[in-house]
Amino acid sequence: MRAAESIMAVLKANNKPDVNYSILSNPEFLAEGTAIENLMKPDRVLIGGEDTPEGKRAVDTLCWIYEHWVEKEKILTTNTWSSELSKLAANAMLAQRISSINSLSAVCEATGAEVSEVARAIGLDSRFGSKFLQASVGFGGSCFQKDLLNLVYICEKLNLPEVARYWQQVIDMNEYQKERFSQKIIECLFNTVNDKHISVLGFAFKKNTGDTRETPAISVCKTLLEEGAKLKIYDPKVEKSQMMFDLTSAKVTDNPEHVRKSVEIFSDPYSAVLNTHAIVVCTEWDEFRELDFKKIYHSMMKPAYIFDGRKILDHEALQNMGFHVITIGKKLNRTGLMRNFESIPQQ
Ligand SMILES: NC(=O)c1ccc[n+]([C@@H]2O[C@H](COP(=O)([O-])OP(=O)(O)OC[C@H]3O[C@@H](n4cnc5c(N)ncnc54)[C@H](O)[C@@H]3O)[C@@H](O)[C@H]2O)c1
């Protein structure tokens, strides 16, 4: 926010005779994994500029470039501040939807409602729309948290503490969801994971990327490691060195040697689950749906647990194989196979 103003200040301070500048704001709305599609078929293009003849000429020139492949109605022109704030606001409101549905997932588990059904019922209302309502272990990625923090900071600077607290709560709810999921794993595994072998499937913040920035997998692994678990991790795209780097960083541990001894990273999922007590799904990779879970069940310690933090697996089929299945926003208590989270006495 206010980047255009800063850039203009720098350029003006280094003014060369006969050289004129106009600064435009043209926020990027490309998401990782779908960047080219987002570029070729954007929902909208936003161009902010100054309300002066030169500013207008600069806006028109950039519009002309986009008009080569984007319909005119989808190109919005605004003043510079509106454009800059819209970028933050779009990400903040998307993150807010995820935190809202995640907060309701906790209510679903406590009441017997099902979060996917609730999300569907909400999403079919055209006033809301169906997107960004998938409950999960929490949101991640480089953009949402950064833009929310940026917005909170701006609100505090503007002496708008209520607004700052409102957006801060979206981040707090995300932290709560990550921690809630991690605690659920511990409680279901008889209130201790000390020396238990746990397989973590997926480490990236979402599928189709190797990016681990702000990934919920780091929070989940951190809690499990602090509780003494041994982790066996597999992700199809994330480099082994990146995972070890993330888990040994000062933000995660003050004892990197202990982490190195407690974490093994695998290049195939079947080796990662071998002889483990539980599987924790942290990323919604498509290939996890296709795994041979019968084979996996036989290679695991019993009772065998699956914690589906992304709601991507066929829970009924897994229960029929003998797994204890725990997921987000839904009580699974069929057949007595499940020791569901709520039925375990809390300490
Ligand atoms: N990634 C970049 O480099 C970049 C750069 C500039 C702007 N942006 C903007 O930031 C936004 C975020 O980009 P991103 O790359 O982090 O990807 P993203 O928006 O796809 O994912 C962000 C988070 O939202 C979650 N999520 C995605 N779809 C969801 C759904 N349907 N229900 C619930 N949760 C869902 C993901 O799991 C992830 O944790 C983009 O929309 C884009 O406008 C991104």
Image: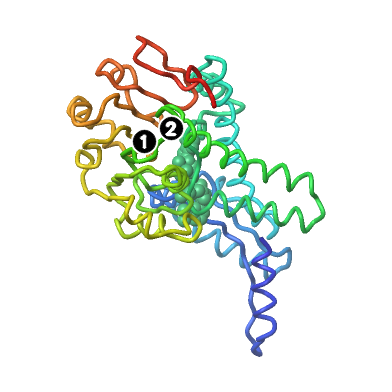
Which residue is found at the position 59% from the left and 30% from the top?
103
Q: Amino acid at mark 2?
A: Ile
Say above or below: 50 vs 150: below
Quadrant of the image containing the C terminus: top right
User: Are the residues at dot 2 and dot 1 in contact (C-beta closer than 8 Å)?
Assistant: yes
Q: Which residue is mark 2?
A: 185
Q: Nearer the viewer, residue 298 or 14?
A: 298
Give the x, y percent position of residue 114: 50, 18
Q: Is residue 67 visible?
A: no
Going by the numbered disc 1, the residue's amino acid type is Val
Query: Is 302 in front, or is 43?
Result: 302
Q: Would you identify the image quadrant in which residue 73 lies?
A: top right
Mark positioned earlier in the residue sequence (2 or 1):
2
Judged from the image, the secondary structure of the residue bearing numbered disc 1 is: strand
Tell me where residue 274 appears, x and y as whole percent. 21, 37
Q: Is residue 197 left or right of residue 69?
A: left
Give the residue at x 20% y 38%.
270
* 249 relative to 127 in the view: left or right: left
**For the view shown, which residue lies furthest in the right direction?**
159
User: Would you name the residue on which mark 1 appears?
Assistant: 280
Query: Is residue 150 shown above or below 282?
Result: below
Give the quadrant of the N terminus.
bottom right
Q: CA distance from mark 2 to mark 1?
A: 8 Å
Residue at figure coordinates x 76%, y 45% from the top left: 163
